[in-house]
Image: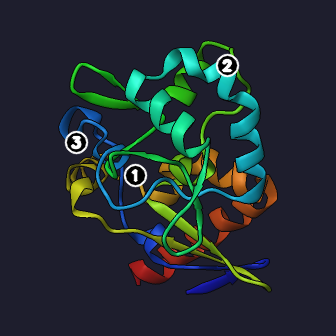
Amino acid sequence: MFQLGKTIVSEDILEKEFVCNLSACHGACCVDGDAGAPLNEEETKILEEIFPKVKPFLRKEGIEAIEAQGTWVKGTDGDLETPLIDNKDCAYVIFDGKTALCGIEQAYNQGIVDWKKPVSCHLYPIRVKDFTEFAAVNYDKWDICDDACSLGKELEVPVYKFVKEALIRRFGEDWYLELEIVAREWAKVKSK
């Protein structure tokens, strides 16, 4: 672990390699698991605001889940998250054949909304846990992403580079530039 501003960062995001491989996993992270995507307070307001614009992109089951539960929910641990369909798929999931995609992101890609998706989804496989004085930035190893780890290793793309856009979105450009400096120094130490 190392400190970068008001974050404590796991070395795993520098050392582990990762590139999403949708052709292999078919977006399993959007339909597997036991909770919706983590949200922050600001994102709950955004979801409420954009739902009417995103709704035409969603599946009937997703719309029904959102209309029954709300655009966001409090999970069993009290954390804010996206609602689920039958405790499985994220309510915002759509499918392109067998591949799960984000309905919010599809609306974003078509210029309907200006918010890409929850930052927790954008950051994956990085998970951020906010504490009073700092945020913990960790790599989340999940076996459904084994193909992404293999592809990342093959392409030699470390996690922090794969999620560059999302890290900048979450922490800012200056933070990311500092992370790159740390990564270069880390690589020098590792190569000795």
Residue nearest the observer in this picture, 99 or 36: 36
Taking the spot 59% from the left edge, 68% from the top edge, the residue there is: 79
Residue nearest the observer in this picture, 33 or 70: 70
Q: For mark 1, what is the residue? A: 157
Helix, strand or loop for disc 3:
helix
Distance from Cα at disc 3 to Cα at disc 2: 28 Å
Give x and y (percent) for residue 7: 70, 77
Whether tag 1 and tag 3 are in contact, CB under 8 A, the answer is no
- The image's mark for residue 70 is none
Please tell me which of labels 1 and 2 falls first in the chain: 2
Specify the amino acid type for callout 1. Answer: Val
Taking the spot 59% from the left edge, 49% from the top edge, the residue there is: 164
Helix, strand or loop for disc 2:
helix
Give x and y (percent) for residue 72: 61, 48
Specify the amino acid type for callout 2. Answer: Lys
Q: For mark 3, what is the residue? A: 25
The answer to whether 108 is drawn above or below residue 118 in the figure is above
In the rendered structure, the answer to whether residue 91 lies left or right of residue 133 reads left
**Which quarter of the picture shows residue 4?**
bottom right
Distance from Cα at disc 1 to Cα at disc 2: 35 Å
In the rendered structure, the answer to whether residue 73 lies left or right of residue 174 reads left
Give x and y (percent) for residue 57: 51, 17
Give x and y (percent) for residue 20: 35, 43
Label 3 Cα crowd, 10 Å radius (few <14 / some 14-19 / many 20+): some
The answer to whether 108 is drawn above or below residue 150 in the figure is above
Q: For mark 2, what is the residue? A: 53
